[in-house]
Amino acid sequence: MSHRKPPIPFPVRIPFVEQLGLELHSCADGAAELRVDLAESHLNSWEVAHGGVLMTMLDVVMAHAARSHDMLAGPGVATIEMKTSFLRPGEGELRALGTLLHRTSTMAFCEGRVINSEGQLCAHGTATFKYLRALPAKGRHVKPLQRADGAAS
C-alpha cells in the first residue's frame, strides 16, 4: 500500500514535460520535487534512463525551485547555463530535488539531484536561470509564458 501523495498541478504548461510524464510533487520556499516512473520510452540502449531524461528532470526541478517564491504571479525563467554530472544509472522511480541557492532580481542559482528509489544519487546538476516576463522570439515577436490554466502572462 503506497503512502505517496498525489502530484500537484504544474503552474505553467510545458508540453515536453507532459510528454515525458514528469509529476510535480512539491514547489515552495526555494525547493521543488519531481518524480517519474520510468517507462520504455525513457530508456537508452542500456535499458536505463536516457541522460536527456535526467537532464530534463534536473532542468525542470531547478527552474521550479527558482520560481517557487512567486509561482503564480511571478515571471518565468529561462535556463542560461547548466552543468550535469551522471553518477549511476537511473532505474525504476526517480525523484528530482531542486534547491534555490541564491537569487537576485534577474537571476537564480540552483542545485539539483536525481535519486533512485533506494535514495542513491544518479545525477547532480547546477544551473543559472534568468527571470523573464516574456521570451523574445523570431521576428521580434514576444512569446508570453503559458500558464497551466490557459492564461498567458
Image (cartoon, rainbow, N blue to C red):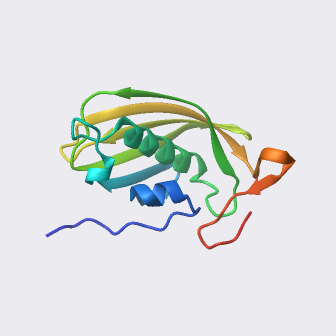
Q: Position of residue 99 (x, y in %)?
A: 48, 41
Q: Position of residue 133 (x, y in %)?
A: 76, 52
Q: Position of residue 15 (x, y in %)?
A: 53, 59
Quadrant assignment, res 50: top left
Residue under the image location 26 percent in, 40 percent down: 90
Residue under the image location 79 percent in, 45 percent down: 138
Along the line of sight, the residue nearer the viewer: 135 or 66: 135
Q: Extreme left residue here?
A: 1
Q: In this view, does 131 lie to the left or right of 50?
A: right
Q: Extreme right residue here?
A: 140
Q: Measured along the vertical axis of the image, is residue 145 above or below residue 80? A: below
- How many numbered circles does the render carry? 0
Along the line of sight, the residue nearer the viewer: 29 or 121: 121
Residue under the image location 13 percent in, 70 percent down: 1
Along the line of sight, the residue nearer the viewer: 40 or 59: 40
Quadrant assignment, res 48: top left
Residue under the image location 42 percent in, 45 percent down: 57
Q: Is residue 53 left or right of residue 151?
A: left
Q: Can residue 94 be seen in this view?
A: yes
Q: Can residue 38 be seen in this view?
A: no
Along the line of sight, the residue nearer the viewer: 93 or 29: 93
Q: In this view, does 81 lie to the left or right of 46?
A: right
Quadrant assignment, res 2: bottom left
Q: Position of residue 77 (x, y in %)?
A: 65, 46
Name the quarter where the C terminus is drawn: bottom right
